Image: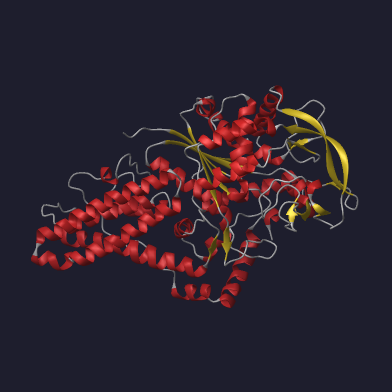
Amino acid sequence: MWTTRNWIVTSAWPYVNGVPHLGTLVGSVLSADVFARYLRMRGHRVVFVSGSDEHGTVIEIEARRRGLEPKAFTDQAHEYIKRIWRLWNISFDNYTRTESEVHKDFVRGFLLDVERNKYIETRDQFTAWCPRDRQYLADRFITGTCPYCGYEDARGDQCDRCGRILDPELLINPKCAFCDGRPVFVTRKHWFFRLDKLSDIIYEWLKNHKLLHDNVKNYSISWIKSGLEPRAITRDIKWGIPAPFEGAEDKTVYVWFDALLGYISATKEFFSKSEDSDEWLKLWSSQETMTAYFIGKDNIPFHAIIFPALIIASGRGYKLPDIISATEYLLYEGEKFSKSRKIGVWADEAAEIFSEIDYWRYALMRMRPEDKDTSFKWSEFIRIINSELNDDIGNFIHRTLTLIWRHFSGEIPDSSKVTEVDVEIIDELERSWNLYTQRMDKAEIRPATEVIVELARLGNQYITKKAPWFKIREDLEDAKTTLHVCFKLSLYLATMLYPIMPKSSAALLETMGVENSDNPIVRDKPIELLKSKHRIKEPRVVFTKIPKELAKTLLDQNEREKLMNIIREKVNAQRPDALRF
């Protein structure tokens, strides 16, 4: 039996020291948007939140390099990134920022509760000081060799190779990330979150969790078994939320603790503008509320261990995570995205290369790296658009609608003569819808897209085999049944595509005569979108291929680089000073 549920959907807060690239989109924001749209389409109540992560030494240093105050830097970056989300049709209910007063007040109050519950204590900590630059160095601005796996370019907070959380003094041969000089470590008083005291509770929660994906659960349990340590929650930097603890007036809150709590504060901020300003608390306090987090795999320990530990330590009873969807890495033609080396495609550049954002959304979800690192390749991008979207899906739907428009004046024919072949297709259609919803319910987006493609190919095989364009003259009843079934297939395909390609799908559904096509609600099956004696509108071309000349350029590395340089120069000039390469 279908039941309306309350959902809080979140994406990792993008750090505003740069323009989001395709990997950022796949790993968090775009995937979260697809899931939020799917839930809304199924009739659930959804609050979709995220925000710009703008504190910390990274921003402080980058702002200084550009001759800006940190706040001026993040003001520019935040506004530009919001424009990018609008460009990509991301349906946030609230996209906020860590400089929000609601957020800052929430974080300080929350951490005081954690302290009152005796999960925060002071300790002396070795803090890196660069004598040459005369500044304290945040963990990530110390590099060296990982003591666990030997990776020579590990950061002071985490090793990108083995994923272990580090302390900078553990690094072998540490050096300043700015001048390559060797830092000295001085003793400073800091406030620590006693993560170790919550180890058993978090372990049991993870072990008994029914919805966590295997990669999240297995990695987190392994991390706990290796031993949890207290984590410093304060930093010796100026740019951030002032630490709320007595005696910590010269400290700020470590940016990771700050940003994690933003999921809750963003919900609070969203409802602060409504008539029921306490609704955020009802949602977060109810165990019936469902929550979903979309992140990259490097963020697993923060979301599956530290965030739930903070919630428990606060004693506030907020809902612990239900779904944590952590993608592997998206590479670019086999290499890591790199701003300094200009390797990759950034979100604002993509629209200049090819303006159909819905096509980008579909292609990226087809490449979503759910079980292993996946490389964005231009050859695959072109194949997905030209072969799958245009040939498999688009041509089938267009043929179906055109035949109904031409031979039945747009009215969907009934199915009075049903053969065994027709029954098999109808059964397969229902099986496909059930499989699609099962996968989407668990945020398995790429496998859900595979169901769409397979169903479209099945439709093409069916319509070719039944050949209604011939049967219309020889066996009208059989042709009616074929087109009735094909229309049902087309309706299901357009509905399945809606969360991924909202603009294109809405146009398709409108052509199919569906009311409220911009916000379709399908609580059970797409067939409920139809009326009796249903009629369609005059069909238009559904999808188009990437132009041949553009495809040729994108497949030629030298020509592609020439095009990319032109586009990058154009886009870079439109970016604010804070985000120019």
Quadrant of the drawing holding the N terminus = top left
> Which color scheme did the rendering employ for the protein?
secondary structure
- On the question of residue 512 being in view, the answer is no
Question: Which residue lies most toward the left here?
Answer: 474
Where 323 falls versus 341 (above or below)?
Answer: above
Would residue 28 appear left or right of 540 to someone viewing this image?
right
Where 221 falls versus 320 (above or below)?
Answer: below
Residue at 59% across, 50% down: 297
**How many numbered discs, if any?**
0
Residue at 53% across, 57% down: 372
Residue at 67% across, 61% down: 339
- On the question of residue 374 being in view, the answer is yes
Question: Which residue lies most toward the top here?
Answer: 116
Question: Which residue lies most toward the front here?
Answer: 225
Position in image of residue 460 (x %, y %) = 27, 64
Would residue 581 appear left or right of 406 to someone viewing this image?
right
Q: Indicate the quadrant where residue 462 lies.
A: bottom left
Would residue 152 appear left or right of 454 to someone viewing this image?
right
Position in image of residue 534 (x %, y %) = 20, 48
Where 555 falls versus 402 (above or below)?
Answer: below
Position in image of residue 235 (x %, y %) = 78, 39
Position in image of residue 225 (x %, y %) = 64, 40
Quadrant of the drawing holding the C terminus = bottom right
Q: Closer to the camera, 530 or 116?
A: 116
Residue at 64% across, 27% down: 313
Q: Indicate the quadrant where residue 199 lies.
A: top right
